[in-house]
Amino acid sequence: MTELVIQAQTLSRDFADVKAVQGLDLAVEKGCIYGFLGPNGSGKTTAIRMLTGLLRPSAGEVRVLGLKLPQAADELRLRIGYMTQKFSLYDDLTVKENLRFIASVYALSPRAQKARIDELLDLYHLEAQQQRLAGRLSGGQRQRLSLCAAVMHKPQLLFLDEPTSAVDPQNRRDFWEQLFDLSAQGTSILVSTHYMDEAERCHRLAILEYGIKRADGTPEELMRNLGAQVVEIASSDPRRLKQRLLGLPQVVSAAQLGSRLRVLVDAAISDPVAYLSHQSALAADDALTVVRPSLEDVFVVSTGARSQ
Amino acid sequence: MIALQRIGAVLSKELIQLRRDRMTFGMIVMIPLIQLLLFGYAINTNIRHIPVGVLDYSHSGLSRVLIQTVEATQVVKFTQRFSALEAAEAAIANAEVRAVLIIPADVSQRLARHPTVGLGSPPASDELTARPVAQWLADGADTLVAAAIRSLRGMPLTELLDKPANRTTPTFEVTLLYNPEQRTAVHIVPGLVAVILTMTMIMFTSAAIVRERERGNMEMLITTPVRPVELMLGKIVPYIFIGAVQVAIILGLGHVLFQVPINGGLLQLAAATFLFITASLSLGLVISTLAKNQLQSMQMTVFVLLPSILLSGFMFPYEGMPVAAQSIAEALPATHFMRLIRGVVLRDVELVQMMPDVSWLALFTLAGLTLASLRFKKRLD
């Protein structure tokens, strides 16, 4: 059996009358990149804060790296890294000064500090910016600086809260390469995102909505076990078609992609193409194809199509 | 050892940020400099040249000489002449003058019968001789001005009559120690140290933690292994040096510009200042754990600052306050430091002779630091 770095049972957290996280069960294996996928306000940040010991759960049990939280939070801090959603290093310090501060706070010896900072600046392509104030960096540079700070003390487990929300696509790709490098070196990573393509890169992921875990598994499992079939219809009037199809109880969702309509049909229907072509809403020349489900389809189905 | 390294990390970070913050950096020097010049010159309890008017019913040579003699005391300065009582009263009401000297028509008779003229003391029953020479009508609302006018009540008139001074033996002999010339600056400048340090030290530190929270750095800080007390100490230490610089500016310039003596030992002075700076800083830290933003921390600073100016004995003597106000004053670090610094600077007192004040400041610091560290939670809830 593989070692678990995060174990949580029925983890919950209430803020006044808002239930931010409800009954979350989690099991994250060592060395894996685990994703939290969910819209804003789905409880991703609250869950991460509980797992890092920053928030006390209202109910439930958490063990991170074998340490019981929130009691062992101080000990845990030395072994985890946390990259906050908002840039939280000092804007009025340079890149190097920020890293030196972090290194000293983690009690690296002066010699080790210098070596580690140089290594990180090189690894994350920040040498040219090392004398620049953090407040003057671009989004991608800031994000790399935050990652540098989070991995300064070589944590066994890294928490990343929406790390790529202010970054362009090329930087996002590079960033994920860096995460895979860390993962290959044995670092376990928990990352939250609301991007489907990022979620698809994770080894495993949990889909969160309104603080409740709607589904979890590997992206492949989730797509394979989708409780619906996906049909794409090329139509001359996809907007009107969508309105009419959504009235059918067996149609879970319908989303327009240019001139095509992506329709999710309940899995109980054995032949979705035949079912759909018998609907009066369809014109004779509409072309129907069954396609492979995507993670977005999984998201739509598991969050109950409420996002229509 | 590790704790020291973490305190050092916070400290050097704080210094770098301070160096980059030009505005704050400038304030460190400008606040004591400007306030010293302002208050050192402006605050004066020896009231001189009060603008007054005169209502002269006698129009005699004697009345003119009387006016000149009064003006020669430098307490008042005659700026207006009135011909009717109504006009004089209106001028007092409009604050054009603070008092009016009313010289009666029979001023020469009154003067002739006045005991100081030296015709010997007439019997007390003689009503005419008991009458004063002239009358002052003063704005009594301002007690300091009223007192200055009242001090003229018994002024000698021998000069007026060109007679040798016929001094009476005073009941008490008064020897004024430490400030024989009665210069207000000697009293005010050491007190200014307490007021300025209260303001800057509490303001800087109370903003220190709040700023981390406002700028979003707190979320990062609490995920690091830095302990609350290490964070507090790292933030306090740079300001101890800043406080020392400010004290040097105030007392140094006060010595040069206002000839304020520094009679006590520098070591005593340094020790007293250190105690007060740390007490103010820890109070600032407590405020910073209470305030949610920098505006709130500023408001709370002012809340402490005003009683520190008005109740600490900086302007008004502690002894004159009612007991309730005295106990509030006793709680303020500024009150105790006011006694210490005036004691050391003016009277060359050793701190060991003022242990109650010294220990209050030390305890205050300890309590403040503990409270701030306890209140600062390394959690978000």
Image (cartoon, rainbow, N blue to C red):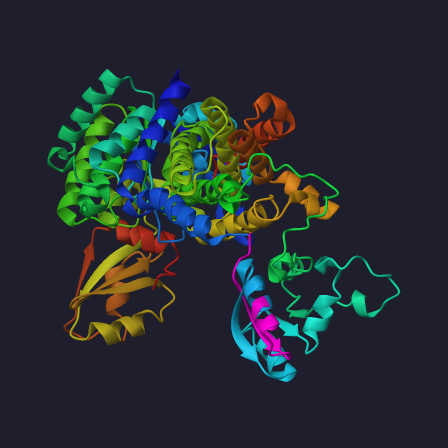
State the residue in front, A215 or B351: B351
User: Residue A153, located in which quarter of the rendered image?
Assistant: top left
Q: Compared to B175, does B5 lie above or below?
A: above
State the residue in front, A149 or B293: B293
User: Residue B83, located in which quarter of the rendered image?
Assistant: bottom right
Of all residues, the one furthest to the right in this rendering is: B125
Figure quadrant of the N terminus of chain A: top left
The span shown in magenta is: B46-65
- Return the x and y of residue A39 as percentages of the image width and height: 35, 53
Whether residue B136 sits left or right of residue A94 in the image: it is right
Figure quadrant of the C terminus of chain A: bottom left
Q: Compared to B24, does B11 lie above or below?
A: above
Q: Is residue B53 magenta?
A: yes
Whether residue B101 sits left or right of residue B271 in the image: it is right
- Return the x and y of residue B368 as percentages of the image width and height: 56, 34
State the residue at coordinates (41%, 29%).
B237
State the residue in front, B206 or A244: B206
Query: Is residue B163 in sight in this rendering?
Result: yes
Query: Is residue B293 in sight in this rendering?
Result: no
State the residue in front, B324 or B80: B80
- Return the x and y of residue B181 as percentages of the image width and height: 53, 42
